[in-house]
Amino acid sequence: MSVLEVKELTKSYAGTLAVDHVSFALEEGTATALIGPNGSGKTTTLSMIAGLLKETEGTIHKDFKSGVGFLPQYPQFFSWLSALEFIEMAAKISGVESKNIRQQSIRTLEFVGLGAAVNKKTGAFSGGMRQRLGLAQAIVHQPILLLLDEPVSALDPTGRREIMDLLKSLQKDTTILYSTHILNDAEEMTDQLLFLKQGKLVEHGSLAEVKNRYAEPKIQIRFESEQAAAAFQSRVLWPMDRTRNLIDLPLTEHGPTMQQVLEALAQDGSGISGVNRQNVSLEEIFLKVAGEK
Ligand SMILES: Nc1ncnc2c1ncn2[C@@H]1O[C@H](COP(=O)(O)OP(=O)(O)OP(=O)(O)O)[C@@H](O)[C@H]1O
């Protein structure tokens, strides 16, 4: 069931299209990664869905009355408030019932790993703690849809890992749409991938579908020695990349077929220690799509 359906969503700033007729749907309980180069419209898209920015054209249909959580790219806090005071304020604004505010706020702070800092002033928080606090304010009312604008970009690898693990544990009960420049994270937690470029949705689908569209099958052959690899390279004369005893052989329409490669390898059998089919990474796809005119 779709929790959110966005149709022809468009935002224009003085005639420039920051988001250009973007359409997609989010299914319940899924995680969707929004990726794209700087300035491609990710923040603008999330802000429109969060209701913080009015769309110029298009529609946003939410299949629920309330219950959106939003973590902005640069969350702002009131430095003089403690973590608990801030989250209680967020809970109140988000419509949590008065009698549940205290308990739900403490539970949420504990969930994001700030249980020991509930009474600490937010002005004294480190970058990692601020990000956790931002996440806490976004989830304290147990939203149906959670929107996150680069939730981990400002964190070190340990902080990133911890926040990603928190998000994964939320995914069971929440539909998540998050933007990221960390493509490893997008590979790790995504049921659906949305790729924006200059405001347009240029790629869309599951990670496997997108990868399949860009897959340039290549096989990697590990020879037992550099000499064996060099001998193979000069014997078959197909285009390939060789690094010492490793050969990457693309299976393009101009190159050899898998059958031909296997036959050639059979003749060389004694010198080969492994053959792998190489997969295309999201980073390779990103560079390709972002670079296309
Ligand atoms: N308030 C504004 N007024 C005018 N133009 C804007 C405004 N906000 C954003 N833009 C423009 O809209 C486009 C999309 O910006 P947006 O911040 O949504 O991109 P982004 O994909 O989130 O970028 P980044 O990865 O750098 O965060 C950019 O060209 C930006 O300059």
Image (spheres, rainbow, N blue to C red):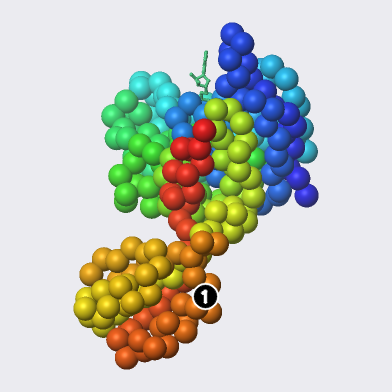
In the rendered image, residue 64, in percent from the top left (x then y), is placed at 76, 37
* Residue kind at label 1, given as amino acid type: Met
Residue 191 seen from this side: no
**Distance from mark 1 CB to nearest ligand 1 atom below 8 Å:** no
Local secondary structure at mark 1? helix
Seen at 46% across and 37% down, the residue is 291
Q: Which one is in front, 234 or 257?
A: 234
Q: Which one is in front, 50 or 38?
A: 38
Left or right side of 240 for 190: right
Left or right side of 140 for 152: left
* Residue with the most extreme bottom position: 270
* Residue with the most extreme top position: 14
Residue 73 seen from this side: yes
Left or right side of 66 for 181: left
Q: Which one is in front, 141 or 18?
A: 18
In the rendered image, residue 21, in percent from the top left (x then y), is placed at 69, 27
Q: Which one is in front, 198 or 110?
A: 198
Seen at 62% across and 36% down, the residue is 201
Q: From what the image shows, is residue 272 above or below residue 73?
A: below
Q: From what the image shows, is residue 283 above or below residue 140?
A: below
In the rendered image, residue 91, in percent from the top left (x then y), is placed at 57, 31
**Tag count:** 1
Which residue is disc 1 drawn over? 258
In the rendered image, residue 200, in percent from the top left (x then y), is placed at 61, 31
Q: Residues within 10 Å of mark 1 (few under 14, many from 20)?
A: some
Seen at 42% across and 82% down, the residue is 264
Determine the image quadrant of residue 95. top right
Seen at 63% across and 45% down, the residue is 204
